[in-house]
Amino acid sequence: MQVVGHARAVGHLRINRERQMARASRFIDPSSIGQADEEFSQSPESRWIRKKIKMRECARFLAADLEKSFKTEKDTLCCCGLPFFKHNRFTAIANSPPSAVTWSWKTDTNVLPTNAFGEIEFVGYDEIQRKYVRMDAETKMGDVLHLLLDVWDMKKPNLLISVIGGTENFRLKSKLKDIFRRGMIKASKSTGAWIISGGMNSGVMKYVGEAMRDYWLTAASTVPAVALGIANWGSVKNREDLQDDFGSGLWPATYTLIPGTEGNEKCLDPNHTHFLLVDNGTTNQNGLEVKFRDELERQIANTKTGNSQADVNIPMIRLLIEGGRDCLESVQTSIRSGIPVIVVKWSGGLADLLASVYESAKVQQVVEKLQGASRMRSRSVTDNIIPSKLRRAIEKTLGSNNVEGYWNILRECVYERELVTVFDYHKTLEIDVAILKSLLKANKDQEFDQLKLALAWNRIDIAKSEIFTEDKIWPPGSLHEILYSAIKQDRVDFVDLFLDCGTSLKDFLTTERLLMLYSTIPDHSLLKELICRVKRKHNCFGTDVTIKDIKRLIKMLIDINVEPYATRPANQTSQFGSNRKKESKLPFEDLFLWSVLMNRQDMAKLFWRQGKDATAYALLAFGILNAMATKTDDTELRNSLTRNAEEFGDLAMGVLTECFEADEKKTNVLLIRRHEQFGEANCLKIAVKSDNKQFISHPACQDFFRNVWMGNLALENGTFRLLISPVFLGLFLLKVKEVYYYVKEDQSNKSIRSNSPSIRSRHGTLERQMNLKRLTSEPIRSSAYCSVKDGWSRQNSESIEGYTKKKLQGIRWHLHRIKSIYTAPVMIFAHSVIAYFIFLGIFSYMLLIEFSPEMGSCEIIIFIWILTLMIEEMRQFCSTSQVKRDEEFTRVALWQKFLKKKKEYWSDSWNKVDVLTIGLFILAAILRFCPETISAARVAYSFCLMSFFFRILHVFTVHKELGPKIIMIRRMMIDLVFFLIILMVFVLSYSISTYAIMFPNSVLRVSLIRQILRKGYWTLYGELFLEEYEAGGEDCTYNATIYATNPQRRCPEERGVATLLMAVYVLFANVLLLNILIAMFSNTFQKVQENTDRLWHYMRCSLIYEFYNKPFLPAPLSLPIYIILMIKWVLNRGCGVCLDLSPDLSEAQDREIMQWENVIADAYTQRLKRDRENSMETKVFEISERVENIAGRISETQSSKDIVHHLDRRMDSMEEKISSILQFLNAERNRKLLNKTEKNKEIPAVTFRHKSY
């Protein structure tokens, strides 16, 4: 009967459930099913989750309590925890009583595709949506890890922090709570850690969520924070909001937090980022997710942080806060698995109990042998007998049952002391440091693993204090793989530490490693895009980055041939080859260029400090970064590149300033010293190529250019002497620097050496650097020879042993003086300007007076003159992008060399003007030989003369006030072009509309366009054409027959509308637009005026270089010199057409200059470091930290005082209560004594004496 009654009740419940399902189906929109299926079909994430991730549902209903099941339908629960009506309609029903059968989630549940996944949006919180999925408790850990890393695209963590502890709401001390939050934030920022908790909005899990909330609020780190909540699906409150019956997921699922709890159900925490909801088909059963969580954490811990050999398994640590019996098993499992555990003391519960056992245990050192090596291990020794104090703590925390068993587990947990760390916030305030120290302590015998952990966590302070101790010696090459990881991960402090420990970059950096670094370029980065452009330009295929690609890229960015990779053959374009293992000759410089191209500023500055040629490489970085900034549309990236470029520009300026203050003559040599790795370029050329006007404006550069400009002329020659000296051919007024020579005491041969600044002589055969032997054995070949070497190596020497110093006198001095005057660039400039004005006078005279069909003498002179100017332009064209003397023509295609020369030549705007002017002259010359086009030739000559007059503006660049005005004119012309585009909109609209109103149905003629545009254009200048608007009477006619033959006589129509339109047009065009143009010009003027000195110095540099290379005779007298230079150019295969400012230094001299610059640069960087440390910002930061520490100590002291005061109050209250009790007892005693009259003996009174606190 009992079984029959049970089956009948189940039948009624099934019918009721089916009716409810039918009612619910009425509200399902069939179209939504198709829509959901379509969305599901379009989502790869949904398809993968539905395919791989399963859930469980009860497959057999078995009433949990038979007696209770007959009371009401609602109270009838299955063993799975759900009422009957919430089961699937196909759920089997057990026809036997519960006592006869058992229910198991492994056998009595069905595995189905999950119906709860997507993104959660917590109502009332931020709009950030969190990923979630409901999954079977027996899901493969490989699939779970694939879901996290690939499907959800979560970055691999460098640390796994598993937080366990109290699940119910408990109160954590405010100071400890703040320390916990800060520690979690620091751990997330510095390591990119994953923090795993139960994911509920209660207990320690809620504190984890609050720490993540504070992390997001800081918004100062680019490292994504991950708080992974692993919860029991059956314990999630309001979980129905997360389910989707259509299988496409919820995007998002709207989830509302409901306060309070129902049984074991709790709400999810809104501050976690991801949720894994473990399901076994049951509800309201705690501890289900513990095993799943342990397996997943072990799976993650067995995964490496990266793909290189230097990467380690992801370190894991458990953090215990409070806790009870459920956490004791997790701690025991962690210790057995070798996972370090941090016990947060003073958090209560199990944490305080474990801390007490750990601190009360005795420490024993044990020597263990593992794989043939001995190492010291620390063990905790505890007694078998439980101390009474700990017994009471165990009973209070874990319960009075099985105290001995709990004691043995606690002893096992603290036995391995390296795996347990007690964090006491009274002793230290940084829980993140305690986490890393705990990991290092657990691996203290494995230095490389410790170092990899510190590197992965980016804690240089711990590495210095715990790993790189004074007694530790690292074998050569042992840190190479870790150094590579540090460079790749941009760990600047670690790279600096490795270098300080003696790691040789020359041994470390091979071509293979350098290519591996370049292979780490992000796919969507600016550098990758630029490299792809270079590959396409040179018809290179493949995705691998080669050394040749980098060279071409730098050439494209800054037009400098960088040759730092001396170990690699030039014709090797593949990244695989025989030289991949060869060491780099310039390791610091190679890594510096890699860092600059990757825009890793701190790393680049580190290698810049460690490398050589500080000034040149800083200038190169300035040019590369500025050029890259012009190639991107990303405003943030462009600002970053520009800011970094300015920083390297300041470094170059700072080093140059220090050098200039230390030794001016050595600084001059430093500026023009050739750099083999830069294609023989010097610092000045790099500065010009990188458009570094600030560097060119430096006093050291200007002092050098002033010496070049003056040549061998004395600097005391004033402007007045230089202006009037050409009148006297410069022979009487100008002073020349004195020249001394040395005579060997026992020989009659003499050699002259100048004491003038570091400029070599010009034109003809130049003297090269000579050693002392050549000074005595070879005759002088150039009396104007200026030795760079003499300018700095013997600048303080008045005599040389075995030689006598004498002053150059007599005829040789006069010859030297004449040559110095005529070869100085300033005098060449003066003579060229005078000759140019004579040329313009002759040209103007010819065009105004003598131009006729027959060619006159003036025109012949003009032809010869312009022929000379054409040869000069050809010389300038050939002097660009010179080829080395030892380079064969077959090495570079002639067409490519021509394009390079054309690009460099065409970069100068004045060269464009020269080409246009010469082209106009050639056109005029062709036209003038044809009698029919003689008039057109005159017009062409006039335009040519006009262009020659415009060329005078180039002369003004020598003047400080007039030079910048040329730049103003050029930039204002650009403004004018943009203004004209806007202006033409108004001009056309007004002109066409007005003409159409006044003269409709006009006849199409060529003159019609002129008639339309002239009114709108000339009205801008005040010509209003009022006579046309007011025309009438006999002056015009409305007869179409008449004005068809004479359009000028047509009377305008609708004059009033046209006049009104003209008034509006004048208002906008003459008032508004022209004032906008004036504002644009004013803005341009202000910008140029702010940088007047810098712009003028830069223009003057170009002018000096131009006239330094010109022949000393002006056109057309320089024609024979050009013939000689042409012959020389042919004989030298493209070299020798221009002079070089750089000296020929010996290897010893070059090394001396380099070392001198390195010493100055090191001193400068050290001074910058001291200035930063002593800066006001640093001091304020240090003071704020000290104040915070003092405030914390004061707070601790105050809390201690509060505790003492509280104890005093309690003691006083107890004293008062005891006194009251004693008074009552005495009163009772006295009352009883009065009732006993037979006893005459007096009983003494009882008193209580207590100590007052």
Image (cartoon, grey):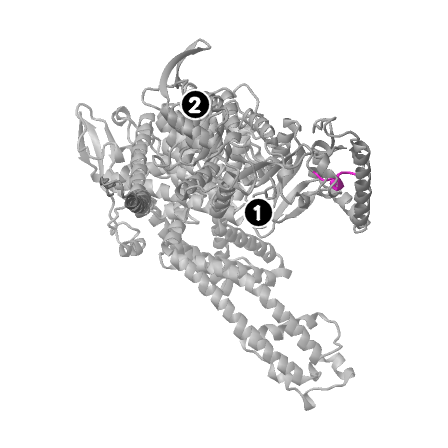
Task: Pick whichever of labels 1 and 2 is earlier in the sequence.
Answer: 1
Quarter where residue 952 is shown = bottom left
Check residue 474 for magenta coloring.
no
Looking at the rendered structure, the secondary structure element under dot 1 is loop
Work out which residue is located at the far front of the displayed protein and give it: 1238
Do callouts 1 and 2 mark residues in contact (Cβ within 8 Å)? no
Which region is colored magenta? 82-88
365 w.r.t. 882: above or below = above
Quarter where residue 142 is shown = top right
Q: Residue at x 60, y 83 (%)?
A: 1026
User: Dot 1 corresponds to which residue?
Assistant: 260
Q: Nearer the viewer, residue 1075 or 1134?
A: 1075
Query: Does residue 292 appear left or right of residue 771 in this picture?
Result: right
Figure quadrant of the C terminus = top left
Residue 1227 marker: none
Q: Nearer the viewer, residue 785 or 1229?
A: 1229
Figure quadrant of the N terminus = top right
Looking at the rendered structure, the secondary structure element under dot 2 is helix
Residue 414 marker: 2
Q: Tell me the amino acid under the disc marked 1.
A: Gly
Work out which residue is located at the far top of the displayed protein and give it: 372
Check residue 84 for magenta coloring.
yes
Let me know if residue 815 appears in the view: no
Q: Residue at x 22, y 33 (%)?
A: 741
Q: Nearer the viewer, residue 582 or 604?
A: 604
Measured as percent of width and height from the top left, residue 407 is found at: 45, 23
Measured as percent of width and height from the top left, residue 879 is found at: 47, 40
Count of numbered tags: 2
Measured as percent of width and height from the top left, residue 412 is found at: 46, 20
Let me know if residue 977 appears in the view: yes
364 w.r.t. 526: above or below = above
Q: Tell me the amino acid under the disc marked 2.
A: Val
